[in-house]
């Protein structure tokens, strides 16, 4: 498990360090904290083969992501779930899409998108190659930007699975999760959207 925090950094270096950390893992783009002087963020990350599980907590921030050649060549999806507060998402030409606490949303990292977190919050992210989901769900790209609520039993199971993963990642200093955990999650994601 990897851990990163801006807590000990000088205030004028925090946003740049956070941008670099997110660019390596979740989203490459412009990071604009609501209040640079009070900004802080922390990230816990576990790599499972080509998949990366992250639990991120940070202050209010706007993240504007533009795909680059590397992301396009190694196309990935990002599944995220706000843990304690929702945030706003602009994606696929739509703005003002709200993803509430406990809801899930799939983003194509090869397409521009913007996340706006209005206050300090924690979220779960799973980044994985597109081909892993598209084997199970051939039209996966069609479902990007669709928010998964708890209306379906499969969605509630996936949300519970994610909450337990977050608890495991948050409570463990060096958790080693087996690869099948992510494969099981992909099966659940495909089942929710199918």
Image: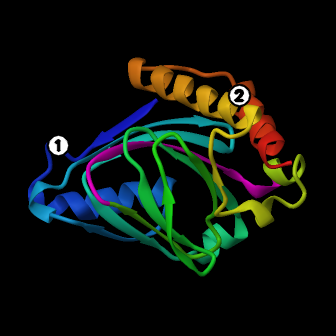
Would you place residue 145 above or below residue 1 in this image?
Answer: below
Q: Residue furthest front?
A: 151
Q: Residue furthest bottom?
A: 93
Would you place residue 40 above or below residue 178 in this image?
Answer: below
From the top left corner, tell me how far across and down residue 112 is, in percent: 56, 76
From the top left corner, tell me how far across and down residue 91 is, in percent: 57, 72
Mark 1, Cα crowd under 10 Å, few <14 / some 14-19 / many 20+, is few
Q: Is residue 121 magenta?
A: yes
Asked which secondary structure carries label 1, the reply is loop
Would you place residue 131 above or below residue 187 in this image?
Answer: below
From the top left corner, tell me how far across and down residue 130 is, in percent: 76, 57
Q: Main secondary structure of the magenta part?
A: strand
Residue occupied by mark 1: 7
Q: Is residue 33 magenta?
A: no
- Looking at the image, which residue is at 15% across and 64% down? 36
Whether residue 192 is visible here, answered yes or no, is: yes
Measure the C-alpha gap from mark 2 to mark 1.
Answer: 31 Å
State how the image is colored: rainbow
The quadrant holding residue 73 is bottom right
Q: Are marks 2 and 1 in contact (CB under 8 Å)?
A: no
Asked which secondary structure carries label 2, the reply is loop
Q: Which residues are magenta?
A: 118-131
Residue occupied by mark 2: 179
Mark 2, Cα crowd under 10 Å, few <14 / some 14-19 / many 20+, is few
From the top left corner, tell me how far across and down residue 175 is, in percent: 50, 20
- Looking at the image, which residue is at 82% across and 54% down? 131
- Looking at the image, which residue is at 81% across and 58% down? 140
Q: Is residue 184 left or right of residue 93?
A: right
Would you place residue 185 above or below residue 137 in this image?
Answer: above
Q: Earlier in the sequence, mark 2 or mark 1?
A: 1
């Amino acid at each position: 498990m990897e851990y990163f925090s801006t807590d000990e950094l000088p205030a004028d270096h925090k946003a740049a360090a956070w941008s670099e950390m997110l660019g390596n893992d979740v989203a490459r783009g412009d990071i604009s904290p609501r209040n640079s002087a009070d900004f802080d963020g922390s990230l816990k990350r576990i790599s499972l083969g080509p998949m990366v599980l992250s639990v991120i907590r940070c202050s209010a921030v706007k993240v504007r992501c533009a795909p680059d050649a590397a992301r396009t060549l190694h196309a990935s999806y990002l599944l995220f779930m706000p843990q304690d507060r929702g945030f706003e998402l602009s994606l696929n030409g739509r703005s003002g899409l709200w993803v509430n606490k406990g809801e899930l949303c799939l983003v194509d990292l090869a397409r521009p998108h913007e996340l706006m977190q209005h206050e300090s919050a924690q979220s779960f992210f799973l980044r994985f190659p597109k081909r892993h989901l598209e084997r199970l769900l051939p039209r996966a790209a069609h479902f990007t930007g669709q928010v998964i609520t708890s209306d379906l039993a499969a969605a509630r199971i996936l949300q519970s699975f994610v909450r337990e993963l977050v608890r495991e990642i948050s409570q463990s200093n060096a958790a080693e999760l087996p690869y099948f955990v992510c494969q099981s999650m992909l099966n659940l994601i495909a089942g929710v959207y199918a």
